[in-house]
Amino acid sequence: MVVHETLLSRLKDKTLVVEAAKVGSKWAQNAADGTRFDVVNPATGEVLASLPALSAEDARQAVVDAKQAQKLWAKRTGKDRSVVLKRWHQLWIDNADDLALILTCEQGKPLAEARGEILYGASYLEWFAEEAKRIYGDIIPSHAENLRILVMKQPVGLVGAITPWNFPNAMIARKVAPALAVGCAMVAKPAAETPLSMLALAVLADRAGIPQGLFSVITARSSSEFGKEMTSNPDVAKITFTGSTEVGRILMRQGADQIKKLGLELGGNAPFIVFDDADIDAAVDGAMAAKYRNAGQTCVCANRIYVQSAIYETFVEKFSAKVSELKVGNGLDAGVTIGPLINAASVAKVREHIADALDKGGEIVVGGGVSDLGPLFVEPTVIRGATATMAVSREETFGPLAPVFRFETVEEVIALANDTEFGLSGYFYARDMARIFRVAEALEVGIVGVNTGLISTEVAPFGGVKQSGLGREGSRYGADDYLEIKYVCLGGQEV
Ligand code: SIN
């Protein structure tokens, strides 16, 4: 056991940190070849824990166990499944402080944000525990007098899940909750940077009485071996993935031979538009939330801020003043609002985008410098004079950099906003009702925030259009992603 003192000493329940993986019905302490990998605190560089680096063979074993468990689970009533999931939900809430601490230590986000994520994740479990009882079918008026037409909804079966490091709790929550609610099993692979959060949930799943084998957590250094196994294993009915568009494409290609069902929540390049009739102070608050939550590391982060010419200077001034108040530091320290980025590659990407923007005529208003707190800390930065030629207008930065673009007309900004292969989310601030409908309808995205910078909730469908993904998570639509529709044509009915 190498679990670091920073983490261990603060936990109320030390058994929530495990240095093992959940493979089907067993906890595996070691990989067959003995290899392990370290989980590192991005704020301090300390090794938090060491985990077995499992192979495709382990994932295959998890699939065997899950297949058995899923058959029995699917036979249980929706109400019965709901009761078990509610127990898990209660444990999730009861242990929120510890789960938040684990999350901050492995991911870096400030403790208050981590706690928010734990409750956000738990809300998916609560929502789908309730939905488990409401997976309704249909009876369709028949086309023939002696026939009756029934539509049943049945679980797709066994689902392979790959989740990212930016929301180590909420991203698995919104996959495993609907999957289990409707009668599926799940074999999941957390990101190598942040596996402890999902493992803690697996500990709580055991305590809640989630049947053994139904939820596996496979730890490994990279997702590629796991992805290959899930896409090629005929017992896996569906893959659900949150992460980059690039990896989404790979999974799609790999799954093609078996026409594998896919749920993909991929990259974004969200426009955040402020029209001249907007409440500027509200727009500044919205931009802060949409840009700097999780240090800019969310798929729905405002990546490009477009401000109409007449209010450009006022917005930049007010926004920059707020950004300069952000406090960068270790997420465990009081008052910190921006934690470290997850790794050196993320820092390099932000630096590249800043350098490119400066080369192309952008001007730094706030930040831009190197933080002396450690190699993964980046100063929250605002750049004015951003233009469409800059890398930041085409690529997702995934960091605390806000480029502010100027625009003149509604037509111009709609064209700019839609000029990207991504289509996850978009935001705008305006007061004119006709404009609100026009822009909401014109933006080529799956989620629109109008006069708000926060759009995430378990009760609404989350997902993208274009190359931002397939399917929806959350809301009643989120259950559909784990269901098959079966049509039964019932003949021989008395006329
Ligand atoms: C994401 O970054 O993929 C999810 C963000 C959210 O749920 O708000």
Image (cartoon, rainbow, N blue to C red):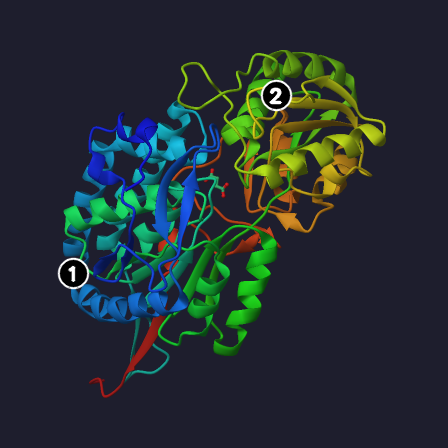
The residue shown at (76%, 40%) is 391
Asked whether, in this view, residue 326 is left or right of residue 485, the answer is right
In this view, the residue in front, 324 or 16, is: 16
Mark number displayed over residue 171: none
Q: Percent x, y for residue 48?
A: 37, 37
- Figure quadrant of the C terminus: bottom left
Residue 153 appears in view: no
Q: Nearer the viewer, residue 478 or 429?
A: 478
Alpha carbons under labels 1 and 2: distance apart = 55 Å
First in sequence: mark 1 or mark 2? 1
Verify CB contact (< 8 Å) between mark 1 and mark 2: no
Rendered residue at 66%/43% (across/down): 442
- Could you tell me which secondary element the residue under label 1 belongs to? loop
Q: In which quarter of the image is residue 155?
A: bottom left
Examine the rendered structure and indicate whether residue 399 appears above or below residue 384. Answer: below
Name the quarter where the N terminus is drawn: top left
Element marked by disc 2: loop
The residue labelled by disc 2 is 371
Amino acid type, callout 1 = Thr
Q: Answer whether residue 251 is visible to the viewer in this image.
A: yes
Residue at the location (56% across, 30% down)?
376
Note whether 236 is above or below 471 in the view shown.
below
Ligand 1 lies under 8 Å from the Cβ of mark 1: no
Where residue 90 appears, as percent x and y from the top left, is: 19, 38
The residue at which mark 1 appears reads as 77
Relative side of 404 to 64, left or right: right
